Amino acid sequence: MRVFVIVVLIVASLCAKDIDRYADSHYKYIATLTKAKAQQKLLAHMGLGTIRKETEVMWRKGYRIKEILYGNGKWLALYSAGARSQSMSIAERFGDLDDAIVAMWKRGWRLENLEHGLARWVAIFSKSEDKIDQAIERRKSYAAITSLIVRYWNKGYKVVDIEYGEGRYTVLFERKKKELRQSLLYRKSWSKMRRAIARYRAKGYKVDNVLFALGKWITLVSKTTTQPKQKVVTAGDIATLRHIMETYATAGYRIDDLAQGW
């Protein structure tokens, strides 16, 4: 019981300190944590080539990539223990990556994650036993992607990931397998986005994806029959982010999404 109280106090302290600590003008990492046990590791390197080599090592150790992110001069890779087969593709231009994605779909691989940083595109795939029913669309403006997303929602698809690079928003869609309601939030500052997230959380939504692009914050939220416990916290540097991950892990939380911005 004594240990439990200590853990709760530490997590409560982080909640109070890390969410409100950084002003809108301060560079920050955003971590979305979900109440679910998972063994995770966070690696950071300046070179994408190093991250790729480290990823191959982590795969052999039984880990898989949960999230990959570029920000503030470094690549971050978040790994979770799991046996699912994965593959990584890297390209300088999205046109080249697009060809690789189509080829992987034909081979039965599902696209899980997209990231753009330092003039490089990274795609993470996982081997799937199910039929792949995904689509990728790109648009120049936020207004264009919102109308595009609504059309896909009406066709029975959900948004899996949103990324910005080469002057365009890239949206990954996937056919829904269960009832799911999604909404897209758009705010000019993180403080306003944080309040918007809190309002949607109060309505039963969970955070799926956070993105900072062109000076604006975009958050994808969804609502299903059950709402998991979540925390959305900020960190000013990688050391603090890693400390948050390790501390919340003791309370049974895992990181499901990472973002960065001002």
Image (spheres, rainbow, N blue to C red):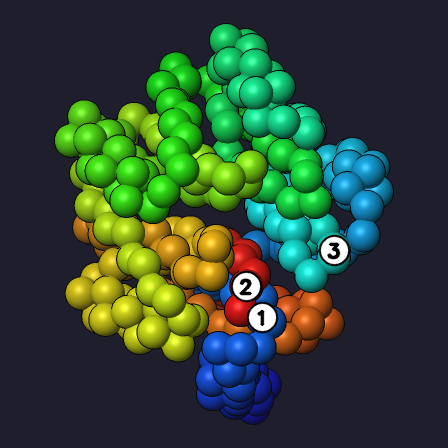
Q: Are marks 2 and 1 in contact (CB under 8 Å)?
A: yes
Report the residue marked by disc 3.
74
Above/below status of 130 relative to 153: above
- The one nearer the camera, 18 or 225, is 18
Q: Is residue 219 left or right of residue 100?
A: left
Q: Are marks 2 and 3 in contact (CB under 8 Å)?
A: no
- Residue 226: give x, y in percent of width and height: 24, 54
- Give the distance between the C-alpha atoms of the residues marked 2 and 3, in whole angstroms: 13 Å
Which of disc 1 and disc 2 is earlier in sequence?
A: 1
Which of disc 3 and disc 1 is earlier in sequence?
A: 1
**Residue drawn at (58%, 45%) of the image:** 66
Q: Secondary structure at mark 1?
A: strand
Report the residue marked by disc 1.
28
Q: Secondary structure at mark 2?
A: strand
Q: Amino acid at mark 2?
A: Gly
Figure label count: 3
**Residue drawn at (51%, 14%) of the image:** 102
- Looking at the rendering, which quadrant does residue 196 occupy? bottom left
Which of disc 3 and disc 2 is earlier in sequence?
A: 3
- Looking at the rendering, which quadrant does residue 189 occupy? bottom left
- Residue 181: give x, y in percent of width and height: 20, 45
- Residue 232: give x, y in percent of width and height: 44, 69
Report the residue marked by disc 2.
261
Q: Amino acid at mark 3?
A: Lys
Q: Secondary structure at mark 3?
A: strand
